[in-house]
Image: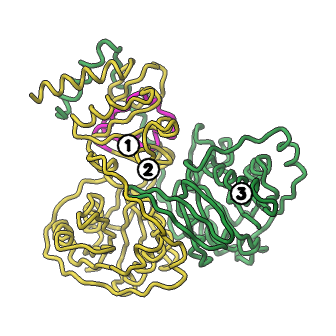
Amino acid sequence: MSEVLIVAEHADSHISKPALELLTLARRLGDPVAVVFGESDDTAAKALGEYGASRVLTVTDPAINDYLVAPKAEALAQIAESVQPVAILITSTPEGKEIAGRLAIKLGSGLITDATDIVADGTTTQSVFAGNWTVTASVTHGPLVVTVKPNAITPEPAPVEPATEQIQVSISEAAKSARIVNSEPKKSSGRPELTEAAVVVSGGRGTAGNFTAVEELADVLGGAVGASRAAVDAGWYPYAYQIGQTGKTVSPQLYIAAGISGAIQHRAGMQTSKAIVAVNKDAEAPIFALADLGIVGDLHKVLPVVIEEIKKRKG
Amino acid sequence: MKIVVLAKHVPDATGERTFAADGTVDRASSDGLLSELDEYAVEQALQIADERDDVEVVAMTLGPEDAADAIKRSLQMGASAGVHIIDEAVHGSDALATSAILAEAITKAAPDLVICGMASTDGTMGVIPAMIAERLNWPAATLGATLSLADDQVTIRRDDDVASLTIEASLPAIVSVTDQSGEARYPSMKGILAAKKKPVETWTLADLGIAEAAVGLDAAWSKVHQTTPRPPKEQGRVVEEEDGASALIDFLAAGKYI
């Protein structure tokens, strides 16, 4: 059976949920082989095997951490040369997309980014123009190089016992040109990853800079917190939580937009959410056109009542 | 010092964006403009030019006739010259062909630094700067929330989910900047008048030594099968503030969130 490469992102050997989604999609195309960059332990390989990775290839060349993007693309190209995969699946992060673009050139492959689905014959689905159109496409050259949006599908386990292997790669001098001279780790919010969360509560201009109610509602629902660009630009919430065209795209089961008007740039990042609730003072706000439930009112009046009631019900 | 800014002309995101019959973005039926995200790139180039007196900023665009507007806007903001790569054969090119054309054009322009936006607002792939760097074998310092230039070195701050990275690269280099890099200036009246006298060159594929058959829709390595508009969402329930909390509680309970 032909093999399919996936790039498995992890943090200290904890395999990310999007990596399990890639494995689930990869199994439709062939036999999944996971590539792990950086040091990891047995728990990573075990988690990948749980979702069908028959082989786990680890690359620990120091250039991976010392230089931006290019070494990873070079390592993947070398692995692809020996594995000869039918497809290479990478998560649609900014880095993942850049790796994919470089890899497509190296392999002479067609490139598809931000896929939300892939079927057995390699046809992909994408959601474009702020989620207003769906496009199906496939590549005509080389192995399919595709990046897949996180949270687009549900990971399904298919346990196997993976073979693990350390892979030696040779990274060229040309790939060692954008030097990472400092890395300042970010503080964890303690909440679920924005792109992986089942519930996202977002705040916008209507918070007037006070995210307390937004954060508390997210916490009682076990969700993540997001922010509109207006809120981020005002300095009320960090850029890492921005949802929209120039931030994250989320597709949770439930999206609660609090004090967000719903400009096209914001809708681009949340339109494909399964259920949408909007709380906004302006009855004319475009966000209401998307909402399954719209509340015309002040989020600072509505949300605290909801938070108290949920706490009460939880006991 | 010569800086090339890649400036894409895109359909207005606030209008109705559609596809043409051949599966490409319909650029004819709606108004176009300089991609908002490329304005940040122009701004960063101009800030470098403001600080030094030896900087030439060239706005480069690849696209049909209307794309000249992206150059015009860049010149009005303060860029010194424009290059419009225009050739009918380019229509329908994929990212691979687009990056190949731009890489050749950059080689011909021979800048010290190329500045791009983080992505276009129509295709939104965000891959072109990395792909050009791949083709030119140049360093790529991409997605800068800040950009600074000292001697022959660029430095950016790149924020990802787990860390804030400082990236350095020696010139010549290609960088991209995000919408966090600083608001783009509006053209002044003086800038608008001055723009009319600034030189704009037109380059074809032949000028770049690229065969027509190597680009365009037929040469694309990805094929669009179908484009389907998203069905309009059914109007949901809308309630007033006084009923808001109980409506939301009911909604959450019905969805088993609580």
Give the side of residue A310 with respect to residue A170, left or right: left
State the separation of the CA atoms marked 1 and 2: 9 Å
Spot occupied by residue B102 in the image (x, y as percentages of width and height): 67, 68
Residue B186: numbered disc = none
Label 2 sits on what residue type? Ser
Label 1 sits on what residue type? Thr
Query: Residue B89: within the magenta?
Result: no
Give the side of residue B187 with respect to residue B159, left or right: right
Q: Which residue is mark 2?
A: A127
Rendered position, A65 above or below A256: below
Nearer to us of marks 1 and 3 is 3
Q: Which residue is mark 1?
A: A272
Magenta range is A252-275
**Residue under the image location 29 percent in, 54 percent down:** A153
**Callout 3: chain:** B
**Callout 2: chain:** A
**Residue under the image location 24 percent in, 77 percent down:** A56
* Disc 3 element: helix
Rendered position, B16 above or below B212: above
Return the residue found at the far right.
B197
Q: Report which quarter residue A210 is drawn in.
A: top left
Residue B48: numbered disc = 3
Comes first in the chain, label 1 or label 2: 2
